[in-house]
Image (cartoon, coloured by chain):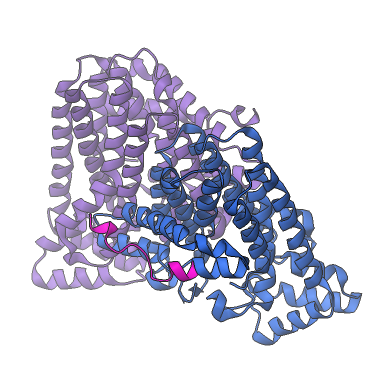
Chain colours: A purple, B blue
Amino acid sequence: MSAARTPVDASLETIVQQTLRNAAADSLVELAPTLVRDLTEIDWRVAEVLGSTYAQLTEAARYACSTGGKRVRPLLMAVAHRALGSETTQPIHSLAAAFQLIHTATLVHDDVIDHAETRRGRPSMPRAFGIPLAIVSGDYLFVRAFELAAEYPRSIIMRCGEACADLVEGEVLQEASRFDLSSGRDHYFRVIERKTAAIIAAALTSVAEIAAAGPAVVDALQGYGRALGLAFQIRDDLLDVYGDPDLLGKPLFGDLREGNPTLLSLETYARLDPRHQAEFERLFQLRRKRAKHLLRLRDLTQMTDASDVVAREATDWVDRGIHCLEALPNGPYRRLLEQLARGAAARRF
Amino acid sequence: MSAARTPVDASLETIVQQTLRNAAADSLVELAPTLVRDLTEIDWRVAEVLGSTYAQLTEAARYACSTGGKRVRPLLMAVAHRALGSETTQPIHSLAAAFQLIHTATLVHDDVIDHAETRRGRPSMPRAFGIPLAIVSGDYLFVRAFELAAEYPRSIIMRCGEACADLVEGEVLQEASRFDLSSGRDHYFRVIERKTAAIIAAALTSVAEIAAAGPAVVDALQGYGRALGLAFQIRDDLLDVYGDPDLLGKPLFGDLREGNPTLLSLETYARLDPRHQAEFERLFQLRRKRAKHLLRLRDLTQMTDASDVVAREATDWVDRGIHCLEALPNGPYRRLLEQLARGAAARRF
């Protein structure tokens, strides 16, 4: 089948190496070749199911999936599966491919909604293929994801579906609080629970179920996945203002531009004196922000200790996630899960 | 569960009565109460799965599903199931709800792509809820559809998935031929095979499988579903130019406006003399057509016998579909399937 001919972009090894080097000062880097093999096989699975009889759709779908993402979900799933003592990750390949496709589908639809120009250093899907094709390609990725999930027992298909419903709910909640700094912390956490944490938790819970793990381990991986997802997303908020656009593959200030109240902007707003608070709010609410507005918003952020507070909050979630892992058998892959959680709160891309 | 409190819009009985009265000059109208009960239970199933913890999403999803559509797919599925001798349609309710949701999801995304203002006599989803919520609500409907499909064996989930992939492919093919009258008949049939026929064929094949029918009956219902889908879509082309906008619940000339080469416009174009052909093409290719352009396109259409040719083609497909039904046990529900096929090619809404 021609679909499986070119397995992956060459950067897969680099991605794993970077992730592990960032995260692991110790011997864990020896696990890299095994994980590169796992991710390569999962990428194959993705490429294989994206074949369509119509070339343009295949091209669009593969473009969406080939732009060198971090493979956070498949990597976590492979490491978790091995941490539970599995000699091969083969039983989870289709499910990991499904979660990767669902993630990509939502990014594609996000880019339509947010009018994003770039994603991972390349033109976004709507930019490269137009809005109509971007919308239906996103649908196509969802459909293929569910076909992959259909290989598993009904409980896993349903968990996958519920995570997708959570994801959509997260989008709707986020949409409802655009340009609204009064939406507050609780609302923020409701959004990221659904948009980011739920799907990672569902992915890892499913891995535990496939590995026939006991309830304590299932709960542990769910708690770990949720905590890591929250930490990952909180770190994202910081990178949106303080990151390196070249490493991120997208311009800074996306959240500020779109008026998404991040934890960073909420904590900044709460800490400013009344005069600067009013200025921050006025600029935040502008529907079309110019560079000077964005830089001023960053200056105002730096007048407070909000970024330290937010960074600490991400670290707290990492600690909670690592604590959950105590229910897992000790070993290099469990230690790697710990390091990956630390990496999520310290990452630069 | 509050989701199942208000079952359906009041028009369900009217819809079935109209469909049957249009189609059946004989005693088949006696089947109406049974079918209204079937459709009511399928509507319940739809309403039930659309409940979300977030009210706005539930509201948007139910809005999309409650705008009094013709329920063609669930009705065909219920009649086919009964035609195979089933005393109750209970075993197919979830699947019929799934196909109804998939159909609705694609309409919602279509309305975003086509910038549609109205649908079934009410503001379209993007018009009523905005583009972001319309996009994610469409995703949500897909997700819930797959959760419903997950109640069935893997073969049915996969057939459902393949039909969705066909549907998306049909969208992409259609997009590729916008404003292009040289795309031709073969391309047109490739589009409607995927956009309309494949999903009806998949729905009826699945009903046959659930009823444990033999291969001859499975093939018969697949062939019937495909033929009915093609006839239905060809009729749609005619209604877009000659229909009654009040009955249709949407303005005329949608296909002409969006530059979709329908069978009617292709056959008109092929039949015009060179001078009028050039005029037809020029007007057809206008990206923003005014009322006078649309009316002139209709005038040019009426200078040929294209609408008769197209109507005959729809009738030919109906005949082929009815021929397929000979493999089914004789009885009132088989006769109703025949009448429903005739209705698809004669319908006014």
Residue B112 pos. (x, y %): 49, 65
**Residue A210 sits in quarter:** top left
Q: If the image is split into quadrants, where does the N terminus of chain B sit?
A: bottom left
Q: Which of B206 and A178 is in front in this view?
A: B206
Q: Which residue lies furthest to the bottom in this view?
A: B292
B254 sits to left or right of A262:
right
B193 sits to left or right of B59:
right
Q: Does the magenta stretch include residue B315?
A: no
Part of the protein shown in magenta: B1-15
Residue at 66 percent of width and 39 percent of height: B219
B335 sits to left or right of A18:
right
Q: Is residue B8 magenta?
A: yes
Residue A85 pos. (x, y %): 29, 14
Q: If the image is split into quadrants, where does the C terminus of chain B sit?
A: bottom right
Q: Is residue A110 visible?
A: no
Residue A80 pos. (x, y %): 29, 24
Residue at 19 percent of width and 72 percent of height: A279
B55 sits to left or right of B307:
left
**Residue B76 sits in quarter:** bottom right
Residue at 56 percent of width and 66 percent of height: B20
Residue B236 pos. (x, y %): 65, 67
Q: Is residue A176 visible?
A: yes
